[in-house]
Image (cartoon, grey):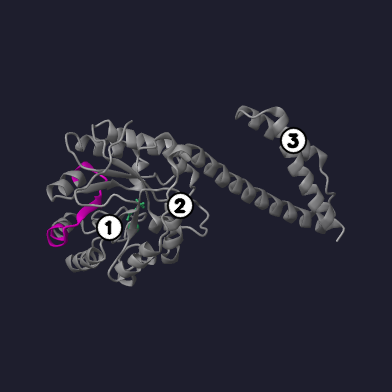
């Protein structure tokens, strides 16, 4: 795939290209007030969800096509470009009918090849930039598959949006960034522009600044950030929306560092290693914590620390799994023996306390 840049006349394409606007278009007034405040701060691309995919029925599902004339007014009155999410062929036709300039495919839709194909078919013969969010699940191939489906219609002004990946355990982030996934996407398609969506990754206002900075340090091209004239009254995603003025402050404080082109590939790979090593560390810490709990149980119930049968059984199974995944027998044995040894050391220490 060979992508074309998303050139928009009169829009500065220097990093970061910023797309901002409310999670959802709610009323004509909210849309226009927000847009005018953003435009006054120099934002050139306005986002607003017209059709909202909600996890459960009963949430605010968007105003639907009634909101499209509001976006047209934004264009007319502020000169901004407009962007909205499409999930069906009907959304595509309706949005284009009202002159929406940029379309994006949401995370839940990217995860569904039938839906992406339907959108791709509706886009045949149309020339519009399209942004493709990562699927909700951490599946790089599914993300690339969606990009290919759109690309194959002849539409080459494509960009990817990294909005994080959902997980069962809710932690610091609403959606885990898993930076190594977009970094790998960038390594494979260096000319595919990459946007970060710190609003949906973080899920909270205070995480937008650090995530935006991180994205800039990772050489992302742009940011898509949710901004609402009255965030506390937003009908969707209110915890993560910020006022146009807070957004302005965040953008002004960003430090943009440029990277030397020639080593970019290597830098990307090294970043993946850094991130994966951190992940490894986290998993090891979790594992040792569980070992400690087992140690406490053994102590309380007078069970011996060393259970040779159990160790041999897990050793064999894990080595076989590792070998199946392409790792050497020797390496697997060394690693597993070291982990086991450390668990035993922790439990013995506990016994003697
Ligand atoms: C959105 O951008 O408001 C949205 C619904 O995002 P996502 O598809 O990333 O959940
Ligand atoms: Mn949202």
Residue density around tag 1, few if under 14, some if 14–19, many if 20 or more, within 10 Å? some
Q: Residue at x 57, y 42 (%)?
A: 273
Residue 210 at x, y percent in the picture: 46, 60
Q: Which residues are magenta?
A: 73-90
**Is the distance from the Cβ of mark 1 to the nearest ligand 1 atom less than 8 Å?**
no
User: Is the CB of the residue bearing disc 3 within 8 angstroms of ligand 1?
Assistant: no
Q: Are marks 2 and 3 in contact (CB under 8 Å)?
A: no
Where is mark 3, residue-wise? 334
Front of the two marks 3 and 1? 3
Q: Position of residue 296 (x, y in %)?
A: 77, 57
In x, y percent, where is residue 144? 38, 36
Report the disc number at residue 246.
Answer: none
| Sequence order check, earlier mark of 2 and 3 | 2
- In the picture, which quadrant includes the N terminus? top left
Quick check: 98 above or below 155? below
Q: In the depicted view, which residue is nearer to us: 208 or 215?
A: 215
**Circle 1 is placed at which residue position?**
61
**Residue 206 % position (x, y):** 44, 66
Report the Cα–Cα distance between label 2 and label 3.
36 Å
In the rendered structure, are the residues bearing label 3 and label 1 in contact, judged by CB atoms less than 8 Å apart? no
Quadrant assignment, res 76: bottom left
The C terminus appears in which quarter of the rendering? bottom right
Estimate the spatial distance between the alpha carbons at disc 3 and disc 1, rounded to whole Å.
53 Å
Measured in 3D between alpha carbons, the distance from the residue under mark 1 to the one under mark 2, in whole angstroms, is: 35 Å
Circle number at residue 217: 2
Against 233, residue 112 (above or below) is above
Q: Is residue 255 left or right of residue 23?
A: right
In terms of sequence position, does the residue under pointer 1 or pointer 2 come before the other?
1
Q: Residues within 10 Å of mark 3 (few under 14, many from 20)?
A: few
* Nearer to the camera, 266 or 45: 266
Badge 3 or badge 1: first in the primary sequence: 1
């Amino acid at each position: 795939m060979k992508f074309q840049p998303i050139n928009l006349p009169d829009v500065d394409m220097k990093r970061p290209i910023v797309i901002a606007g409310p999670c959802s278009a709610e009323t004509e007034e909210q849309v226009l007030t927000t847009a005018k405040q953003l435009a006054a701060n120099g934002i050139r691309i306005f986002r607003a969800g017209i059709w909202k995919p909600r996890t459960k029925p009963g949430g605010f599902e968007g105003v639907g096509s009634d909101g499209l004339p509001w976006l047209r007014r934004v264009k007319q009155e502020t000169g901004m470009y407009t962007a909205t999410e499409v999930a069906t062929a009907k959304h595509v036709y309706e949005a284009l009918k009202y002159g929406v300039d940029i379309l994006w495919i949401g995370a839940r839709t990217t995860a569904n090849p039938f839906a992406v194909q339907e959108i791709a078919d509706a886009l045949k013969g149309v020339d519009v930039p399209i942004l493709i969010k990562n699927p909700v699940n951490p599946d790089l191939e599914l993300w690339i598959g969606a990009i290919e489906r759109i690309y194959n219609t002849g539409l080459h002004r494509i960009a990817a949006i990294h909005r994080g990946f959902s997980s069962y355990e809710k932690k610091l982030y609403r959606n885990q960034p898993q930076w190594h996934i977009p970094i790998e996407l960038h390594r494979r398609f260096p000319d595919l522009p990459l946007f970060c969506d710190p609003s949906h990754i973080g899920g909270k206002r205070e995480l937008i600044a650090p995530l935006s900075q991180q994205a800039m340090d990772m050489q992302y091209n742009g940011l898509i950030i949710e901004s609402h004239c009255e965030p506390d009254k937003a009908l969707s995603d209110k915890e993560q929306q910020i006022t146009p003025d807070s957004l302005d402050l965040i953008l002004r404080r960003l430090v943009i560092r440029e990277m030397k082109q020639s080593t970019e590939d290597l830098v990307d790979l090294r970043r993946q290693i850094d991130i994966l090593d951190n992940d490894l560390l986290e998993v090891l810490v979790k594992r040792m914590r569980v070992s400690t709990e087992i140690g406490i149980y053994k102590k309380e119930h007078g069970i011996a620390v060393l259970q040779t049968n159990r160790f041999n059984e897990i050793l064999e199974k894990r080595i076989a799994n590792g070998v199946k995944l392409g790792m050497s027998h020797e390496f697997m044995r060394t690693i597993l023996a070291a982990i086991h040894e450390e668990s035993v050391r922790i439990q013995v220490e506990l016994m003697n306390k």
